[in-house]
Amino acid sequence: MKLRSPLPQRKTRLEIIPLIDIMFFLLASFMLVSLTMTKQQTVKVDLPVESASQNDFKPDMINLAVDAAGDYYLGKDRLSLPDLERVLTERRALDAATPVFISGDENARHGSMVRLLGIARRIGFTKVAFNVQARSGEP
């Protein structure tokens, strides 16, 4: 003998429409939050030319530097701005994908650094970066 429940038996249903609504809301929220997130850090440049060792300079990269007096260096060689531009043009003809690293003394003028950046970009180097050194006590 079968005993039946006095309550009416309903089929189990999974409501998917509210689940989709919640997922779209979460997706939109995460997208908006990720678009507004920017990581900004300011790092002091403290790389005098004298502190660079011979091992820091590799043949597959170009190291430019500006000292506190405003003198320009290619590796360890002091050059004037027109000579530096001529040498960089020759290096670009050999390999256009060579990365260029610009180092500056802590007391170097900002304009000197921007001049080096402008020359490197004008010649056609696409991989140009400023070389910085993190201090050991800072996060």
Image (cartoon, rainbow, N blue to C red):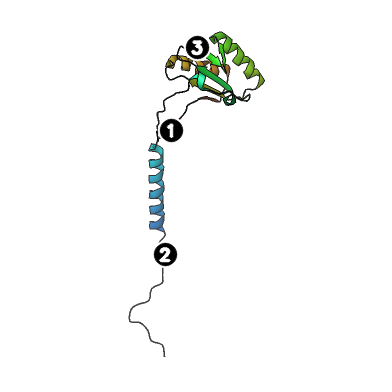
In the rendered image, which quarter contains the C terminus?
top left
Residue at the spot of label 2:
14
Position of residue 10 measured from the top left corner of the image (x, y, whole percent): 38, 73
The residue that disc 3 covers is 71
The 10 Å Cα crowd at callout 2, few under 14, some 14 to 19, many 20 or more, is few
- Does 8 appear above or below 117? below
Q: Quadrant of residue 90?
A: top right
Horizontal placement of 79 versus 106: left or right? Answer: right
Q: Earlier in the sequence, mark 3 or mark 1?
A: 3
Q: CA distance from mark 2 to mark 1?
A: 57 Å
**Which of label 3 and label 1 is nearer to you?**
1
25 up-or-down from 16: above or below: above
Label 3 amino acid? Asp
Q: Which residue is mark 1?
A: 136
**As shown in the figure, which amino acid type bears the numbered disc 2?**
Leu
Provide the secondary structure element on which disc 2 rests: loop
Number of marks present in the image shown = 3
Residue found 46% across the figure and 14% down from its top = 112
**Residue name at image x 43 percent, y 15 percent:** 109
Q: Earlier in the sequence, mark 2 or mark 3?
A: 2
User: Residue 27: x and y, percent?
Assistant: 41, 47
Q: Nearer the viewer, mark 2 or mark 3?
A: 3
Element type at mark 3 = loop
Crowding at label 3, few (<14), some or many (≥20) Cα neighbours within 10 Å?
some
Kindly report which numbered mark, 2 or 1, lies closer to the viewer in this rendering. 1
* Residue 120 relative to residue 12: left or right: right
Asked whether 34 or 90 is in front, the reply is: 90
Q: Secondary structure at mark 1?
A: loop
Image quarter where the N terminus lies is bottom left
